Image: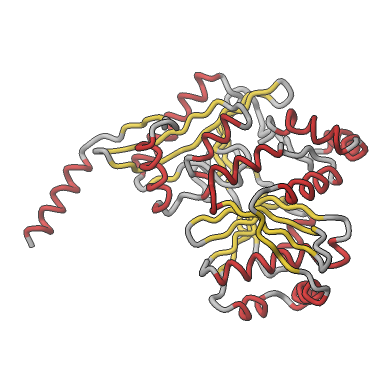
């Protein structure tokens, strides 16, 4: 009884201590460990809240970062990873987080969330950005403009492999079995070499610039076993389809992918995602996060065909020096000529030039 009273008194005392906001120093191991320990346990946190993204944003893309954490009485209660993306072509913005499908505040208390967002707006005004963008999974500011373009797809992984196969709708399941019939197998790669070749070729065919190879090297170096490449090969060992996935707690998130032209004929793309789901089931994971797609696209339809239902994403914008949300994405008609030109560009030139462009998109 006394211990219960003491705990209630301790919590009451802590509640009177104000929340303070600090910046994460990536060279301070203690602060990094505290940040990541909080992210692992916070319900609102995602893989993209990990501290390692700060190093990647700085070292690979040269973006100025502002990784904020809120603490009270020495205990971390919230984090907000931010990076400034500044370019002549696309403007000056503050984003949580570039190259991430999720972001925004992850907090265990309303006071911490409010303090982090307040500090983010102070920084945004001081930097003179056109807008602050928070890539939330839940709406936090109904009064802010909302980017109603993307949805996400998530589904529980059944504990038995065969149950996951039977949960795939019949037509899509037939495509998976087609890949199995063709004798396809999957392999885990220790480096992103095969992955990058297929990925870069794939995005080039779609008319968009590829991220640099060193970015994918950095992802595997920084996140270790939580970043994994799975590649599908045929009986002759030829690479057909590949995916780089992120692992977070009991979830798997296939994030970057690529395919050879012949992959469609052999159903290698379908087989790839089944293999990832099968392996994840055998690892004891519980959630398959199919990630983000634009509404009305082929990617959106493909994920629906797997029996996943779209869930809204709440990309909220606080506008400072613009009147509307920017549309810096391939769906924007004004980029059609650029996309067509990019498709015709030699892939060697595209892979050299692409990183200078894509670093400013995020």
Q: Name the colour scheme.
A: secondary structure
Q: Is residue 82 left or right of residue 186?
A: left
Viewer-nearest residue: 58 or 208 = 58
Q: Residue at x 55, y 64 (%)?
A: 287
Classify 209 as above or below 91: below
- Picture coordinates of residue 356, whole percent (x, y): 74, 28
Q: Residue at x 39, y 32 (%)?
A: 28
Q: Residue at x 67, y 37 (%)?
A: 214
Q: Is residue 129 left or right of residue 306?
A: left
- Residue ranking furthest to the right: 344
Classify 178 as above or below 285: below
- Picture coordinates of residue 169, whole percent (x, y): 72, 75
Is residue 151 visible to the viewer in this orientation of the structure?
no
Viewer-nearest residue: 14 or 55 = 55
Quarter residue 200 falls in = top right
Viewer-nearest residue: 247 or 109 = 247
Q: Residue at x 46, y 33 (%)?
A: 67
Is residue 357 visible to the viewer in this orientation of the structure?
yes
């Amino acid at each position: 009884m006394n211990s219960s009273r003491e705990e209630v008194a301790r919590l009451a005392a802590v509640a009177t201590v104000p929340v303070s906001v600090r910046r994460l120093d990536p060279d301070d191991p203690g602060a990094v460990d505290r940040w990541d320990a909080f992210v692992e346990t916070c319900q609102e946190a995602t893989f993209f809240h990990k501290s390692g993204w700060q190093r990647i944003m700085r070292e690979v893309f040269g973006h100025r970062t502002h990784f904020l954490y809120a603490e009270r009485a020495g205990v971390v209660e919230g984090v907000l990873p931010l990076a400034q993306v500044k370019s002549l072509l696309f403007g000056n913005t503050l984003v949580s987080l570039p190259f991430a499908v999720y972001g925004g505040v992850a907090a265990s208390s309303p006071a911490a969330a409010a303090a982090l967002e307040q500090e983010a707006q102070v920084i945004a005004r001081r930097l003179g950005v056109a807008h602050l963008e928070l890539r939330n999974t839940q709406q936090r500011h109904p009064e802010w403009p909302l980017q109603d373009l993307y949805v996400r797809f998530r589904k529980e992984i059944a504990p038995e492999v065969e149950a996951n196969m039977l949960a795939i709708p019949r037509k899509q399941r037939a495509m998976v079995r087609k890949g199995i019939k063709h004798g396809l197998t999957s392999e885990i790669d220790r480096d992103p070499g095969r992955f990058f070749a297929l990925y870069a070729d794939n995005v080039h065919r779609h008319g968009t610039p590829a991220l640099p190879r060193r970015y994918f090297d950095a992802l595997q170096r920084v996140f270790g076993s939580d970043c994994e490449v799975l590649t599908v090969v045929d009986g002759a060992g030829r690479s057909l389809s590949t995916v780089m996935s992120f692992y977070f707690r009991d979830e798997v998130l296939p994030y970057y992918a690529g395919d050879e032209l012949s992959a469609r004929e052999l159903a290698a793309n379908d087989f790839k995602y089944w293999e990832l789901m099968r392996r994840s089931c055998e690892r004891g994971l519980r959630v398959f996060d199919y990630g983000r797609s634009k509404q009305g696209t082929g990617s959106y339809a493909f994920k629906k065909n797997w029996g996943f239902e779209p869930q809204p994403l709440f990309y909220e914008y606080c506008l400072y020096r613009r009147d509307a949300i920017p549309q810096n994405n391939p769906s924007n008609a004004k980029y059609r000529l650029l996309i067509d030109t990019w498709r015709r560009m030699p892939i060697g030139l595209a892979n050299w030039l692409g990183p200078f462009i894509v670093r400013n998109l995020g």
